[in-house]
Amino acid sequence: MKARILSPSSEHLREASRHLHGGGVVGMPTETVYGLAGSAFSVEALAKIFAVKERPTFDPLIVHVGASVLKSGNPIATLSEAGVIDDTLLSEKMRNTAEKLMRAFWPGPLTLVLPRGSRIPDLATSGLRTVGVRLPRHPVALALIEAVGLPLAAPSANRFGRISPTAPEHVAAELGDRIELILDGGRSEVGIESTVVSLATSESQPILLRPGGISRNELERILGAPLDVAAGSYAHTKASAVASPGMLESHYAPRTPLRLLPATLSELSDTRIAELTHSIGPGSIALLVLMDNAQSAARRFATVARRDVTALTLAPDGRLETAAHNLFQHLRTLDAANAKIILAEPCPASEGLSHAIADRLNRAAFSGNTRSS
Ligand code: TXA
Ligand code: MG
């Protein structure tokens, strides 16, 4: 392990900034998940990001910009002048929509896909003529972007396809042998990635590409209209592949296979649990519970299945925000329990963050099933 985890002192921010100016990459805290940051204008830095993550270059990066963009009073013009986006390619309608969303949700967990500006290399956007832009609200991310004076491209700081990091130790565990600096910003508050909305569509309607930290209802409240959803998180069509290249089915995967329970814990009968655990075969079980008490759930499964069961609850307080905050951390902890399988209670997609949580659980399960079958 060569990475140092640094407190965000001004001295360390200067050190990270020098590193970034030299084409290096840095582990950066954000309110959603930790990112692996490099200059969005440097092909060398971008190449390093892809290499360190072992990320395929068809998966575009999000460019993080600083608070000065909003302070300017005209964020779209400011981003355009900086060469991050090209506002001449935005229709009047899309420009107004973009501005509304920026004012409502920036700084925060919303990424907007806009026409790409002249200073963003092909590598950052996988050759697309659009670029994902986000103004994060984590104070350390904002301080770093200001210190560097450059927009920072940053994917989540995990190896490709694995669980996103929500604490500096997670970044060290994923990439500590490949990077030198990780800034410590504590645990990421939101816990799941930003919502991605495209404003560069031919339909001239905004489209939700990835559910995340800002819910669809919140977006629709500001837009004053229903928001279209990309043809599919799970669609295999060419169209969806182009719309959102990074939305692979298998993602956020623990090493332990993960399977979604066929119903919530209260809906599952003991007979059903017995059948299910029998079909899995012998071995200990890790259980990811949504809101119920973990100990009682573990006891119930242990009694019915007659084996060791470790359980964790995502939201003991019953709040979806808490579930999102804990999701990746708990997946990591259960993965480390070395169980035969992780069984996860499904999150019924209703409102708020439930869509994003259900999306991440489905993707984690997709990989788990692939490997266990
Ligand atoms: O919360 C987040 O967004 C975190 C933190 C670090 O900011 N970043 C993050 O990056 O989740 P990453 O690389 O794991 O996910 C980026 C995703 C891509 O996989 C793709 O789905 C979408 O954002 N994306 C980026 N640029 C795009 C573009 N030009 N067109 C369509 N989708 C884009
Ligand atoms: Mg990611």
Image: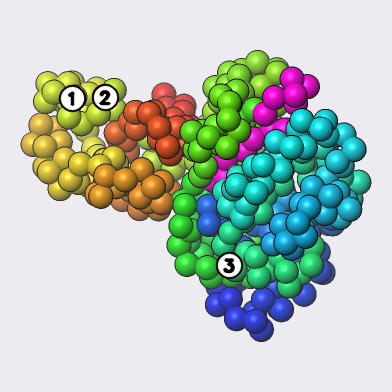
Mark 2 → mark 3, Cα distance in angstroms: 40 Å
* Mark 2 beta carbon near ligand 2 (under 8 Å): no
Please tell me which residue is depicted at 82% across the width and 54% down the height of the picture: 78
Between 26 and 305, which is closer to the camera in this rendering?
Answer: 26
Q: Which residue is mark 1?
A: 268
What amino acid is found at the position of numbered circle 1 in the picture?
Leu
Between 223 and 13, which is closer to the camera in this rendering?
Answer: 223
State the extent of the magenta-drawn residues as a range: 193-206
Q: Is residue 236 above or below residue 37?
A: above
Q: Is residue 300 visible?
A: yes
Please tell me which residue is depicted at 78% across the width and 22% down the height of the picture: 202
Mark 3 → mark 1, Cα distance in angstroms: 43 Å
What amino acid is found at the position of numbered circle 2 in the picture?
Ala
What secondary structure is marked by label 3? helix
Q: In which quadrant of the rendered image does the C terminus lie?
A: top left
Q: Is residue 177 visible?
A: no
* Contact, mark 2 vs mark 1 (Cβ under 8 Å): yes
Relative placement, left or right, of 278 versus 74 is: left
Question: Residue 196 colored magenta?
Answer: yes
Question: Residue 145 colored magenta?
Answer: no
Q: Which mark is residue 263?
A: 2
